[in-house]
């Protein structure tokens, strides 16, 4: 199969600046174009002259699922023909990817969509979608012999990075906003041995410090401006298409924070169509929390010509981001696929999370913006009842159990301006019932639940 450069036996990938098109041979410490300062991306010039055979690729990838090799068992490295070359001895894998695609029958009925599914990226080794990009970017750090890797994070990136750094025997530095990340995520970084600095600022403040740090110290930046992260995260979309028998859905809906994930999934879709692995593009729509909506405003107010940084605030702390790095990449994805951008309120997020939960699928608050966004896209007519929809759930419910418990106890919005609106979600609340250790009391609770 003509996947490799015949002289070097390496896949044909190059770096390119998304704004000025410059082709640096390698990326600098901050992964920005030295000519214009914009972001870099990988592209595959070999695909135009020496296009891989789509049928051969599909059967090779399928065959690998029965292999006992670590790289073949990874849902990321299994698709390595569509990724830059990293020698196998540097690959750090926790068998990431391989995440399930679930139907959501109750949510489908509630939203009036016949075919609604969720790809649950929270079923990755560290319980968020970050692992798919991290396996690949951490391996690139290993290949380049970095001793230290670092990221700024709202929690999931740091948990993931810390795990992969530990597996690859690298030190890692985590910068997180003090008090604004969930215990679940913080505890992961600690257990995996990260040097964890809680900075008295928000995520955007952590990013600023980190960008300065990497210019002064030999640490490898593992935020999603790192194009290896984006390449790894592409595989979620490849795996999804394989799960759907290479028949794309009409819509894919993703949460938008720093906008790396939407960029990666969109890049994969465009590349898969280019390679004739799929015959058409699904519309990829991006949903933000209303309190952290710079991209929504960029598109709706400024036609995508600029973005205005904001001070972000949302209980979905994973996407509490006011100055998203990859907004231009995400904009390109919206334009290429014809997707939409939406914003959803705090109560809409909490309600959607409980609705997904009622289908037996837990997710963290940031993931639930997808269902909340779908409801709006249905109301506006952008998504039709007969169309197929896949939500990308990005994190596991247990990442942020505090949010869930407060919601069910009715405490999440108590004393806030959202308290009135939150009353509408009361029917979804299932507060624990505290009883004496008495059989009659338990039977009473059972009978009362049966009546309701
Ligand atoms: N969902 C979850 C659970 C996340 O953790 C994030 C981002 C997103 C959605 C948004 O993805 O940034 O690619 O648009 N979390 C980051 C972190 C930024 O540091 O863990 P995005």
Image: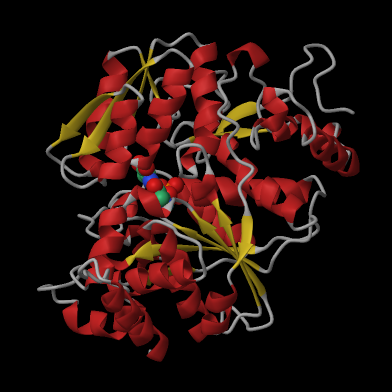
Residue furthest to the bottom: 451
Q: Nearer the viewer, residue 162 or 409?
A: 409
- Horizontal relation, residue 230 to residue 251: left or right: left
Residue 442 image-quadrant placement: bottom left
Q: Position of residue 280 (x, y in %)?
A: 76, 61
Q: Nearer the viewer, residue 212 or 223?
A: 223
Residue 153 image-quadrant placement: top left
The answer to whether any part of residue 24 appears in the image is yes
The answer to whether any part of residue 329 appears in the image is no
Q: Position of residue 174 (x, y in %)?
A: 29, 28
Q: Nearer the viewer, residue 173 or 224?
A: 173
Q: Measuring 73% from the left and 25% from the top, which residue is drawn there?
A: 12
- Horizontal relation, residue 187 to residue 120: left or right: left
Q: Is residue 36 above or below residue 150?
A: below
Q: Is residue 330 above or below residue 160?
A: below
Residue furthest to the front: 439
Q: Measuring 67% from the left and 21% from the top, which residue is drawn there?
A: 85
Q: Is residue 429 above or below residue 245?
A: below
**Quadrant that contains the C terminus:** bottom left
Q: Position of residue 98 (x, y in %)?
A: 64, 43
């Amino acid at each position: 199969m003509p996947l490799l450069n015949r002289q070097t036996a390496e896949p044909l990938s190059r770096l390119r600046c998304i704004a000025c098109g410059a082709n640096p041979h390698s990326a600098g410490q901050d992964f920005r174009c030295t000519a214009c300062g914009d972001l870099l991306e990988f592209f595959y010039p070999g695909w135009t002259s020496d296009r891989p055979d789509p049928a051969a690729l599909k059967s090779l990838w399928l065959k690998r699922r029965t292999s006992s090799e670590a790289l073949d068992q990874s849902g990321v490295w299994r698709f390595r023909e569509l990724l830059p070359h990293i020698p196998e001895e540097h690959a750090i894998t926790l068998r990431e990817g391989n995440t399930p695609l679930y139907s959501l029958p109750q949510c489908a009925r509630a939203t009036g969509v016949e075919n609604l599914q969720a790809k649950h990226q929270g079923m990755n080794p560290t319980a968020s979608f970050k692992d798919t990009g991290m396996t690949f970017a951490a391996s690139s750090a290993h290949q380049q012999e970095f001793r230290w890797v670092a990221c700024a994070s709202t929690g999931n990136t740091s948990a993931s990075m810390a795990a992969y750094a530990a597996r690859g025997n690298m030190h890692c530095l985590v910068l997180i906003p003090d008090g604004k990340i969930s215990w679940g995520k913080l505890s992961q970084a600690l257990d995996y041995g990260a040097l964890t600095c809680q900075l008295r600022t928000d995520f955007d403040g952590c990013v600023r410090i980190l960008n300065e740090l990497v210019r002064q110290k030999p640490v490898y930046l593992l935020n999603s401006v790192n194009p290896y992260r984006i390449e790894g995260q592409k595989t979620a979309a490849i795996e999804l298409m394989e799960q759907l028998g290479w028949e794309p859905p009409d819509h894919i809906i993703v949460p938008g924070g720093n906008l790396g994930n939407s960029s990666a999934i969109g890049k994969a879709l465009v590349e898969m169509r280019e390679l004739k692995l799929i015959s058409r593009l699904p519309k990829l729509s991006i949903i933000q929390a209303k309190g952290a909506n710079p991209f929504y405003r960029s598109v709706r107010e400024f036609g995508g010509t600029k973005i205005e940084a904001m001070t972000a605030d949302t209980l979905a702390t994973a996407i509490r981001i006011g100055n998203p790095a990859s907004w231009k990449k995400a904009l390109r994805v919206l334009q290429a696929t014809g997707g939409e951008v939406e914003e959803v309120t705090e109560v809409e997020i909490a309600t959607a999370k409980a609705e997904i939960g009622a289908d037996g699928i837990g997710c963290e608050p940031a993931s639930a913006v997808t269902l909340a966004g779908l409801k709006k896209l249905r109301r506006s007519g952008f998504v039709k009842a007969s169309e197929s929809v896949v939500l990308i759930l990005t994190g596991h419910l247990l990442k942020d159990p505090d949010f869930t418990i407060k919601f069910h106890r009715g405490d999440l919005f108590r004393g806030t301006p959202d308290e009135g609106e939150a009353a509408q979600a009361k029917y979804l609340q299932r507060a624990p019932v505290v009883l004496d250790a008495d059989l009659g009391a338990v039977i009473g609770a059972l009978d009362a639940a049966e009546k309701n």
